[in-house]
């Protein structure tokens, strides 16, 4: 029992994000004319996956006490690479997917090198590398365009049966038939969540928590700080690449949209915070960020289904949406900051 | 001999980042001039009118960077710059006349006050709190304008300040000089300025030494908001009207200008001269590259590479 209470407290942020998500998404799907269905989930998961990937990517550096302002730029870069390499034969496409993931991973590795070996502040190093990635993306796609193989795009963004038939397998039958409707983006979310769960059990994952909590203590305990940070930034690049790849498959094109990449970066930070990860490092996790991103998206969804004739009808006006997103973000961080009022020793608030 | 030694002593006071930034400005001008000499046979980059025109544009970034620097010296950051700038520009242009000036400044100060209260009392990391106020301001402005560019035109005085000239020197440069002088005085000679450096070096130590740290944090954010507001009103004057997202192109360059100028992003160290030179370097480099018809992608890459290169030279942390 004592153990349970401890576990609950350790995962407080995750649980709050989860509850918020269930509440917001539940309200939305109840109000939606078609109701709760696989199609609706698939459609919404489609719209959320890029932000989910960005938020999970952001979690790695934040856990080590850093920050990655290039998450959005890596998404854009991979998007532009993908729009060139995903319209060939099946083998070419498979290689193209690997190339996209490799580009993102390499970009993350470069960030890691700047932070670890260049000994630059993560904020400013990734700010600068973000402009370089955006520049490369602009070279690859000076104007939006490009092409993606239809089958690949459809299979990756529709559902499990479609995915199986694209791989040459038969659709699911018998008792498992209902699983065939599982939306593909949901499968990708489970996959990245599984990668994260494995990572946090390895010495690099545990090391990331240790480094974020106290770099000196981690060093004294024999954690290889440099490698841990390098792995964290590299994995961040990989996860951002997943987001970029999915963006390509979803939009069937590439676009070096720099404002959009900035928005992904900023929303990824917001998702991380809503998901209960401390920006000071050492506390939280990528699953929380996953739900943090879903919370952010659910807020936007809710605006679509508000009844305009009800007493809250004026909120349905899309012009209110940015204001509410901001207010909810501010509200969430302020609620998370209320511990300050309970602190007895005033010196503890200076971290 | 003694005069020479005194001069050497004075030169020694100028820190390494400032020298490197100055050197880079020289390199940009020389490389640009050589290429125009080869392609067009002119030295257009060294013409006073070109330099003055660049300084006129640099003034907008320079004033925004001034506010950003004050906040960065504390070890914080102000990501609300884009929409504080846009909001004060839009609302003051909407009001029009001389009343627009106090109105615009008040909006900047108010936004800064909210930021300061959140950071000082709730201890929310400034990066996320100012991001929130930025989004809220964006939401308010979208509501105010309906998502379109407002139709109101800039009052006459804004245009005079932004594009007018006195004795061939652009007025915006004078505004920058006034703001810069005020900032230098504040940082060097006042209690507030010295405590800003003290907090940046160690907030706990400053608090234990009797500094009212909350007040200092709030004042710094208010100053940053006011600087963003001044930039916003000048920009409205420059483009004759306010428009959506006019501040988005100023956030990253403002941070970059401060950091290139040698201010430590974790706070506590940095000179205003460095920020001025950092601003000029960024504006000049972008302008020279676009005159040389470098594609947008190449400009971005060089921009990022310059920041990384300068930081690798002098912005590295102690090995820990």
Image: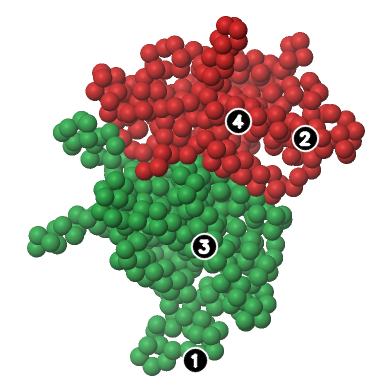
Chain colours: A green, B red
**Chain at numbered mark 1:** A
Q: Quadrant of residue A198?
A: bottom left
Query: Could you tell me which quadrant the C terminus of chain A lies in?
Result: top left
- Circle 2 residues within 10 Å: few <14, some 14–19, many ≥20: many
Towards the viewer: B233 or A105: A105
Q: Which mark is residue A87?
A: none
**Chain at numbered mark 2:** B
Q: Which residue is mark 3?
A: A105
Give the percent coordinates (x, y) of residue A105. 51, 62
Is disc 2 in the same subunit as disc 1? Answer: no
Give the percent coordinates (x, y) of residue A248. 59, 65
Q: Secondary structure at mark 4?
A: helix
Give the percent coordinates (x, y) of residue A337. 28, 40
Image position of B238 with respect to B83: above or below: above
Q: Residue furthest front?
A: B1
- The reply to whether discs 2 and 1 touch (Cβ–Cβ < 8 Å) is no
Q: Which residue is mark 2?
A: B32
Q: Which residue is mark 4?
A: B20
**Chain at numbered mark 3:** A
Q: Residue furthest left?
A: A1
Q: Which residue is mark 1?
A: A170
Q: CA distance from mark 2 to mark 4?
A: 18 Å
């Amino acid at each position: 029992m004592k153990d349970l209470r401890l576990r609950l407290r350790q995962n407080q942020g995750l649980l709050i994000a989860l509850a918020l998500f269930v509440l917001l998404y539940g309200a939305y799907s109840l109000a939606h004319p078609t109701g709760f269905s696989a199609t609706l989930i698939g459609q919404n998961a489609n719209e959320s996956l890029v932000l989910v990937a960005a938020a999970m990517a952001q979690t790695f550096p934040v856990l080590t006490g850093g920050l990655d302002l290039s998450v959005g730029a890596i998404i854009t870069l991979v998007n532009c690479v993908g729009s060139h390499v995903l319209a060939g034969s099946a083998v070419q496409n498979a290689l193209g997917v690997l190339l996209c993931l490799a580009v993102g991973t390499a970009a993350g590795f470069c960030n890691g090198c700047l932070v670890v070996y260049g000994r630059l502040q993560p904020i400013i190093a990734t700010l600068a590398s973000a402009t370089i990635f955006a520049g490369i993306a602009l070279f690859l796609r000076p104007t939006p365009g490009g092409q993606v193989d239809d089958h690949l795009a459809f299979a990756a963004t529709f559902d499990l049966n479609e995915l199986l038939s694209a791989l040459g397998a038969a659709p699911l039958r018998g008792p498992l038939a209902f699983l065939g409707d599982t939306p593909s983006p949901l499968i990708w979310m489970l996959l990245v969540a599984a990668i994260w769960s494995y990572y946090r059990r390895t010495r690099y994952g545990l090391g990331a928590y240790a480094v974020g909590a106290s770099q000196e203590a981690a060093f004294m305990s024999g954690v290889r700080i440099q490698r841990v940070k390098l792995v964290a930034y590299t994995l961040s690049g990989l996860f951002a690449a997943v987001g970029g790849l999915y963006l390509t498959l979803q939009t069937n094109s590439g676009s070096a949209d720099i404002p959009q990449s900035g928005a992904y970066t900023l929303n990824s930070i917001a998702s991380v915070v809503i998901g209960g990860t401390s920006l000071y490092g050492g506390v939280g996790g990528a699953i929380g960020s996953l739900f943090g991103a879903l919370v952010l998206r659910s807020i936007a969804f809710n605006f679509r289904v508000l009844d305009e004739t009800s007493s809250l009808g004026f909120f349905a006006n899309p012009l209110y949406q940015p204001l509410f997103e901001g207010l909810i973000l501010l509200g969430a961080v302020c609620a998370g900051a209320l511990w300050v009022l309970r602190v007895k020793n005033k010196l503890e608030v200076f971290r | 001999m003694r005069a020479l030694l005194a001069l050497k002593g004075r030169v020694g006071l100028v820190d390494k980042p400032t020298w490197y930034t100055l050197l880079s400005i020289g390199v940009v001008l020389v490389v640009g001039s050589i290429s125009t000499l080869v392609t067009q046979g002119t030295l257009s980059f060294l013409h006073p009118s070109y330099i003055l025109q660049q300084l006129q544009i640099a003034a907008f970034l320079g004033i925004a960077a001034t506010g950003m620097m004050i906040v960065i010296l504390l070890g914080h950051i102000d990501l609300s710059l884009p929409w504080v700038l846009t909001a004060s520009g839009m609302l003051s242009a909407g009001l029009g006349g001389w009343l627009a000036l106090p109105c615009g400044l008040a909006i900047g100060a108010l936004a800064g006050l909210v930021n300061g209260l959140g950071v000082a009392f709730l201890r929310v990391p400034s990066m996320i709190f100012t991001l929130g106020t930025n989004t809220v301001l964006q939401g308010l402005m979208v509501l105010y304008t309906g998502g379109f560019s407002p139709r109101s035109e800039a009052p006459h005085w804004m245009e005079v300040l932004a594009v007018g000239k006195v004795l061939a020197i652009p007025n915006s440069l004078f505004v920058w000089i006034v703001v810069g002088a005020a900032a230098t005085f504040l940082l060097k000679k006042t209690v507030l300025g010295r405590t800003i450096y003290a907090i940046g070096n160690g907030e706990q130590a400053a608090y234990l030494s009797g500094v009212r740290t909350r007040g200092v944090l709030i004042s710094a954010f208010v100053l940053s908001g006011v600087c963003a507001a001044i930039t916003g009103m000048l920009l409205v004057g420059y483009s004759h009207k306010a428009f959506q997202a006019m501040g988005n192109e100023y956030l990253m360059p403002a941070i970059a200008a401060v950091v290139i100028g040698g201010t430590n992003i974790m706070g506590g160290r940095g000179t205003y001269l460095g920020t001025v030179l950092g601003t000029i370097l960024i504006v000049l480099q972008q302008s020279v590259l676009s005159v040389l018809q470098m594609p947008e992608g190449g400009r971005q890459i060089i921009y990022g590479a310059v920041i990384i290169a300068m930081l690798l030279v002098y912005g590295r942390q102690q090995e820990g």
